[in-house]
Amino acid sequence: MIASVRGTVAAVAPDGAVVEVGGVGLAVSCSPGTLARLRVGETARLATSLVVREDSLTLYGFADDDERALFELLQTANGVGPKLAQTMLAVHPPRELRRAIATSDLAALVTVPGIGRKGAERIVVELRDRIGAIDGDDAGVPTGEGVVAVAPWRDQLAHALAGLGFSAKEAGDAIEVVAADLGDEGAAPDVPTLLRRSIQLLGRTR
């Protein structure tokens, strides 16, 4: 298993990044919140999880080891594959996701695109006793080397939402709503938080 990669960010796309390690460019599939903090040309460390299929090898990247561990745990639930697990982490940070599962907060879980009420109930039943501690503050994402924003937050949100399959119009509508909620345009917005809010809005309108 490739537990982590550390190297220069060679490229960032809506659905992943290329990290050059020892002269080899590794394609890493990342959640939009993680991608929003990567800067091309800077050094970054990503916790990773390698998903092996008969016809593919996919390396998933995360801001920290805790997020990776939760990603892997989520996939032990029936019906949850790597793509859905990644989407769950895009909508909810690890602490909130653990809390939702541990407290049977189905309303929070069904805000994730692709999860209905029955699916949420199944995830709770299968994982609530294994989800781990929900105390402490792990909602934020560490800002280590290379983990910084690279573009205006509106552009980051638009690219991230496009990478999750939303149309340009859907993304634009959601961005306008979260922009109105911001109020103070002079403040530096927290892009992952805005992204989760956008996905929640779009999940309710589909």
Image: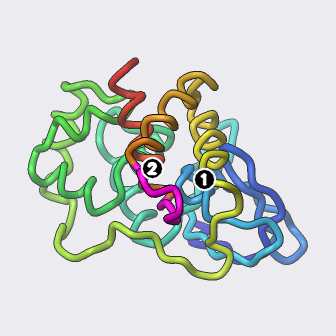
Q: Is residue 205 left or right of residue 47?
A: left
Distance Cα–Cα, label 2 vs label 1: 9 Å
Snapshot quadrant of residue 150 = bottom right
Q: Is residue 118 left or right of residue 183?
A: left
For label 2, the residue is 194
Location of residue 166 with respect to 22 vertically, above or below: above
The N terminus lies in quadrant? bottom right
Q: What residue appears at the point 57 percent right and 64 percent down from the top-left corner?
A: 48
Is 59 contained in the magenta span? no
- Spot the residue most to the right: 23
Q: What residue appears at the point 45 percent right and 48 percent down from the top-left corner?
A: 90
Pick the residue in front: 173 or 78: 173
* Residue 146 place in picture, x, y as percent: 68, 75
Lower position in the chain sequence, tag 2 or tag 1: 1
Neighbours of disc 2 within 10 Å: few (<14), some (14-19), many (20+): many
Residue type of the residue flagged with mark 1: Trp
The residue segment tinted magenta is 182-190
For label 1, the residue is 153
Q: What residue appears at the point 37 percent right and 32 percent down from the top-left corner?
A: 201
* Residue 25 place in picture, x, y as percent: 84, 63
- Spot the residue most to the left: 103
* Residue 82 place in picture, x, y as percent: 48, 44
Pick the residue in front: 3 or 96: 96
Q: What residue appears at the point 67 percent right and 46 percent down from the top-left corner?
A: 155
Snapshot quadrant of residue 206 = top left
